[in-house]
Amino acid sequence: QVQLVESGGGLVQPGGSLRLSCAASGSIFSIGVLGWYRQAPGKQREFIAAISRRRTTNYADSVKGRFTISRDNAKNTVYLEMNSLKPEDTAVYYCNAGERDSIYMKGNYWGQGTQVTVSS
């Protein structure tokens, strides 16, 4: 089993920045891909970004050029740097981990989520 704990969410003004972190514990040797998803009220959970152990990345079109995913394998942590935030980025952001090291597949493990609110 893998446990994921997110942090770094909060309230930010439009145009601002936030950095989310997600620390993995448990059977971390089995972790391949790490990723981020989000879910806004009344909407389905959607893919944001993913990164492989070799640090190849994949992004949703809606965040390309504004968000950057990175990982520190030594610390078993994945990050999401979010810049130029828009009100439509408001959502609960979830960390995701999978045993397959594919940036095109959703993993089996989820964090509890962290709220990001973009509002003036």
Image (cartoon, helix red, strand yellow):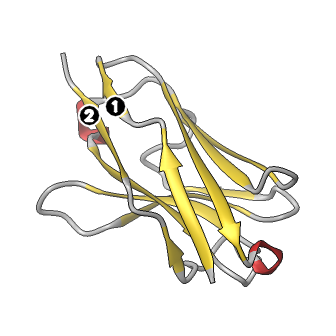
Secondary structure of the residue carrying tag 2 is strand
Around disc 2, counting alpha carbons within 10 Å, would you say few (fewer than 14), some (14 to 19), or many (20 or more)?
many
Relative depth, front residue between 53 and 25: 25
Residue 49 vs residue 56: left or right? left
Residue 115 vs residue 72: left or right? left
Residue 87 vs residue 71: left or right? left
Q: Measured from the top left, where is residue 3 in percent x and y?
A: 58, 70
Q: Measured from the top left, where is residue 47 in percent x and y?
A: 45, 63
Tag 1–tag 2 contact (CB < 8 Å): yes
**Can you tell which quarter of the image residue 12 is in?**
top left
Q: Measured from the top left, where is residue 17 in percent x and y?
A: 47, 22
Relative to 86, does residue 44 appear above or below in the rendering? Answer: below
Q: Which residue type carries mark 2?
A: Thr
* Picture residue at 42% right of the left edge, 47% below the top: 62
Disc number for residue 10: 1
* Picture residue at 29% right of the left edge, 17% below the top: 13
Secondary structure of the residue carrying tag 1 is strand
Q: Measured from the top left, where is residue 70 in percent x and y?
A: 72, 45
Q: Which residue type carries mark 1?
A: Gly
In primary-sequence order, the first of circles 1 and 2 is 1
* Picture residue at 26% right of the left edge, 34% below the top: 117
Relative to 10, does residue 74 appear above or below in the rendering? Answer: below
Q: Quadrant of the C terminus?
A: top left
Disc number for residue 98: none
**Can you tell which quarter of the image residue 105 is in?**
bottom right
Disc 1 and disc 2: Cα gap in Å? Answer: 6 Å
Residue located beneath label 2 in the image:
117
Q: In the displayed orientation, state which residue is furthest to the front.
A: 26
* Picture residue at 59% right of the left edge, 61% below the top: 35
